[in-house]
Image (cartoon, grey):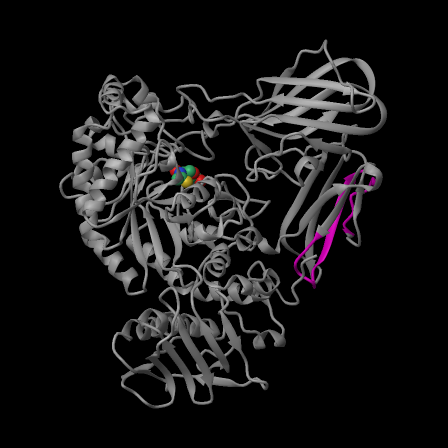
Amino acid sequence: MRKLALMFLAGMVLQGASFAQQISIVPEPAEMTMPKTAAKYVINSNTKINLVGSGLEESASFLNDYIQKVYGFKLAVVPNGKSAGITLSYEKQEYRYPGAYRMQVGNKGVNIAGDNANGVFYGVQTLIQLLPTEGSKTALQIPHVNIKDYPRFGYRGMHLDVSRHFFDVNFVKKYIDYLALHKMNYFHWHLTDDQGWRIEIKKYPKLTEVGGWRNGTIVGRYPGTGNDNIRVGGFYTQDEIREVVKYAADRYITVVPEIEMPGHASAAIAAYPELSCFPGEATKKYVPENCAWAGDSTGKQVIQSWGVYDDVFVPSENTFKFLEDVVDEVIALFPSKYIHVGGDECPKTNWKRSEFCQNLIKEKGLKDEHGLQSYFINRMEKYINSKGRTIIGWDEILEGGLAPNALVMSWRGEEGGIAAAKENHEVIMTPGNFVYFDHSQTRNEDSVTIGGYTPLEETYSYEPVPAALPADKQKYILGAQANLWTEYIKNPSKVEYMVFPRMSALSEVLWSPASKRNWKSFEKKIPAIFNRYGKWGSNYSKSYFDLKANVVPAAANKGLQVKLESPIAAAQPVYILEGAGSSAATTTKYNGPLSITSNAKLTAWNELKGKPAGAKVQLNFTTNKATGKKISLQNNPSKNYPGQGGAFGLVNGLRSEKGMNSTEWLGWEGSDLDATIDLGESTSFEKVQLHIAESHGSWIYGPAKFEISVSDDGNNYKAVTGGQATSREDGNSMKSLEVSFPALKARFVKVKAVNYGQIPDGQAGAGHKAWLFADEISIR
Ligand code: TNX
């Protein structure tokens, strides 16, 4: 069980004296030593910042702004100063990536020496992390330390989607400050998508006049329960863009702009319909019927719902001219070596039915529509290369042949990154299951998220260099980045909630030497990290402290056991168990695993000094003959949707009650659920049920077939016929499939749900493999 000696809960800080001694620098420095006897240096309003050398003003002013904001005073900055205090200077250091520095805190003050100005800036970030988060605000005690530090990766990135929801310049600057405080150096600005075009392009004013606004937004999780009918939007003027780029550069952060093509292009098409294969077709035609629409439904419109849409750029000369013009203006605004061209999720449906596209495929001797996508990206790459820049694309740009110099962002797992690195292409890793910060970070999600479950520990455990990559190809992994897609993130406060504390974990993955990365040490820093967010006035998720309930099979597979775990040593987990033989629903102190052998409702939470603290866990167990039994799977579910405890999750007595947004689901991409349950002894039963999810917009389909067979010896199986599978809607995109038959006796039961196969044309994700989602098998 993970326990912290110190604790912090839901806005309340409980801090021991020992904590004040703890140094909590995030990301962990490469090397750090402390004097034998701990000592302090005090920074107060008389302390001076000495600058030795030029180009250090940005670092001094960042430090001063921070001290002013958090502690309310400012330090005098003295060029060529020699007095005691804080001294910023240069000192040659040999490291692979810019940003190395040394730092000493002693009796005479703080010395920060950088290999370059960037290194000094990172030294200042470390100093900021030594400042107290408690106690006096006028005499800031910092511990004596010796630090030598440098980054592990050259690309340490964070992404922000400003299309699905728009965030103004002030917040974008704040976000950039968050990057700086975490020693990150790339900000990937996702500026265009189906739901809004956010960058002013002088030559095409309608991009922002028309494409920057939508008449409404679906309410709740896709496909939504309605439309809010509120016209929203916004965009950045070119002056604002320059301001942001400069602001970032002052913090040693490069802004990488993303202009999506050829898919996710509806906002541009709304402004200039001739960019579509079918300029005359109304956008509404491409939107599923169950997504409510606001306002004008004729002609081309900016999309109001989430997902992937078929109305993509037509690969015509006119479109290429348009995109080249856009790129010209983008390049003039962004000094970044990299220009991101998207390339992801481009449905081929329209290209298939467009005569123009089919002729183009023939004329250019392309294999098919994937060849056309590759042609599209290659052509834009050539143009961007001719301007001295390099393209980045999402991993779909591997399909149909990779553009020659492209850098690949691997988002659908690590495979794309591995394939690209093997072809000697540079790679930035952004795999969904580790660094998609739009995923939930708690099992008790308190607002809608896109789905998935990426808790803090999982992000922390991420290793950007895949073990599967041969040693001589590892150099192609430039680093990693977390993505923040904002379909379900409407305001700055939720952005902060979703990125913190996972961004702190990621910063350590990207900066600290692999040998310095240690989850247990990181956990010790969590109270200080949270205090710091508090000082910044930032929102953050406290789910790390949630009480966790682990459901496991009981001894000899006779029922279930629930273990309650809390990272807080001083907290007492308590629970109410209704059913399961306990008649009165009384609050009981937890002191060991709970046994579940019949239907039961468990409510559990932490108590701190007798008061409830943190989120409640609520589990409704429905037991049956399969519950807690041995189960094995022929095909493993996807790493992204492993369910709770793998195969066991199918017989843990728990079903999702919330629909898709649950960690109960096991998901198979293209393959079948093929489970064998060992009931332990010959058992009589008459029906088998499978609880599944079905959400075509999210590429999740019910099985093509649902088959049961039984065996007494585990070798010879006999199909159970007679029962036709019936299906019942359970609401929230969930269904129960059931096969019933005259009672029979058997020990082994094979349950097979055959994957739907390829997603049909005209549906979201057409041509891809369908997902099969299931969370529970019951036998009665
Ligand atoms: C996939 S990641 C997308 C985005 C969505 C995101 C939601 C990628 C390249 N494309 O358009 O916002 O999933 O998690």
What residue is shown at x 58% (from left), y 77% (from top)? Answer: 21
Determine the residue located farthest toward the front in the rendered image. Answer: 472
Q: What residue is drawn where x is 47% and y is 56%?
A: 503
Report the residue at 78% width, 33% height from top: 629
Where is residue 379 drawn, in percent x and y?
23, 36
Image quadrant in which you'd find residue 753: top right
Residue located at (80% from left, 34% from top): 598
Q: Position of residue 36 (x, y in %)?
A: 59, 85
* Whether residue 2 can be seen here: yes
Q: State the residue lying farthest toward the right.
A: 681
Closer-to-camera residue (256/18): 256
Furthest residue toward top: 722
The image quadrant where one finds ligand 1 is: top left
What x and y, as percent, mark residue 317? 17, 29
- Total labels drawn: 0
Q: Which residues are magenta?
A: 565-588
Task: Please tell me whether residue 584 belongs to the stretch shown in magenta.
Answer: yes
Compared across the picture, whether 524 is left or right of 573 comes to: left
Q: Is residue 704 shown above or below 484? A: above
Name the image quarter holding residue 626: top right
Answer whether residue 200 is visible to the viewer in this image: no
Left or right: 193 in relation to 505:
left
Of residues 215 and 259, the one nearer the viewer is 259
Is residue 774 located in the magenta-colored stretch of the structure?
no
Residue 677, percent across and down? 75, 28
Picture quadrant of residue 391: top left
The answer to whether 720 is drawn above or below residue 595 in the figure is above
